[in-house]
Image (cartoon, rainbow, N blue to C red):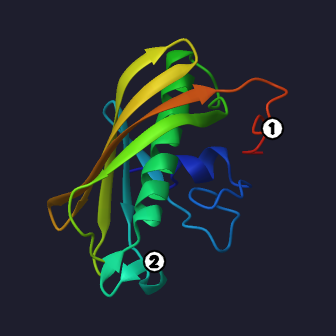
Amino acid sequence: MDALGVQQEFAPNSICFGCGPANENGLKIQSHRIENGLYLEFMPEKYHQAFPGMINGGIIGTLLDCHGNWTAAVALMDAGELDEPPCTVTASYSVQLRRPTPVDTTLCITSQIKSISGNKVEIELLMEANGKVCATGDGLFVAVKEGHPAYHRWN
């Protein structure tokens, strides 16, 4: 696995709560390339709990959203043979919480590219803890152009 996650490699100054390396209070995820997608391991903290021993659903949603967004950005970069990923935003995403997710174990999140059409990428997401599926999801992510408020957000 690459030493740096794609977030640290391409957006070291990002302040996004989920994926921004520069947000000292954020989740600071580190997603790494795999075949047709990205892979992430995340160790939750006690303050991510919804109730004793289990992670808050909003934290799960943030992990899947940011990981999926970066999967789309890297997919568009690779497809367009670009030197850096275009800035992408979430158009829509859904999360299915399959079982309570424990706080005391590493979460493994895998994303896979379902389709690329122009500046739009559909992503499929899977989150496991201790080898059991805790959440699944899918999302539609879109590259934005200059003038959009998020256009230079990774710089």
34 vs 115: above or below: below
Q: Residue at x 64, y 61 (%)?
A: 21
Tag shown at residue 48: 2
Q: Residues within 10 Å of mark 2 (few under 14, many from 20)?
A: some
Query: Measured from the top left, where is residue 154 in percent x and y?
Result: 72, 45
The C terminus - image quarter = top right
Which amino acid, by three-letter code, is at mark 2? His
Query: Measured from the top left, where is residue 77 in percent x and y?
Result: 56, 25
Query: Measured from the top left, where is residue 34 in percent x and y?
Result: 34, 39
The residue nearer to you, when weighing 152 against 140, is 140
Name the residue tied to disc 1: 149
Q: Give the alpha-carbon distance from disc 1 to disc 2, as whole Å.
A: 29 Å
Q: Residue at x 40, y 61 (%)?
A: 60
Dot 1 falls on a residue whose secondary structure is loop
Is 141 on the left or on the right of 99, as rendered? right
Are the residues flagged by discs 1 and 2 in contact, CB closer than 8 Å?
no
Which amino acid, by three-letter code, is at mark 1? Pro
Q: Residue at x 66, y 56 (%)?
A: 16
143 vs 65: above or below: above
The residue nearer to you, when weighing 79 against 128, is 128
The residue nearer to you, when weighing 33 against 123, is 123
59 vs 140: above or below: below
Is 16 on the left or on the right of 129, as rendered? right
Name the quadrant containing residue 18.
bottom right
Q: Residue at x 53, y 20 (%)?
A: 120
- Answer with mark 1 or mark 2, whichever residue precedes in sequence: 2
Identify the residue at the far left of this view.
Answer: 131
Query: Measured from the top left, where is residue 20 in percent x and y?
Result: 64, 57
Q: Residues within 10 Å of mark 1 (few under 14, many from 20)?
A: few
Tag shown at residue 3: none
105 vs 57: above or below: below
Dot 2 falls on a residue whose secondary structure is helix
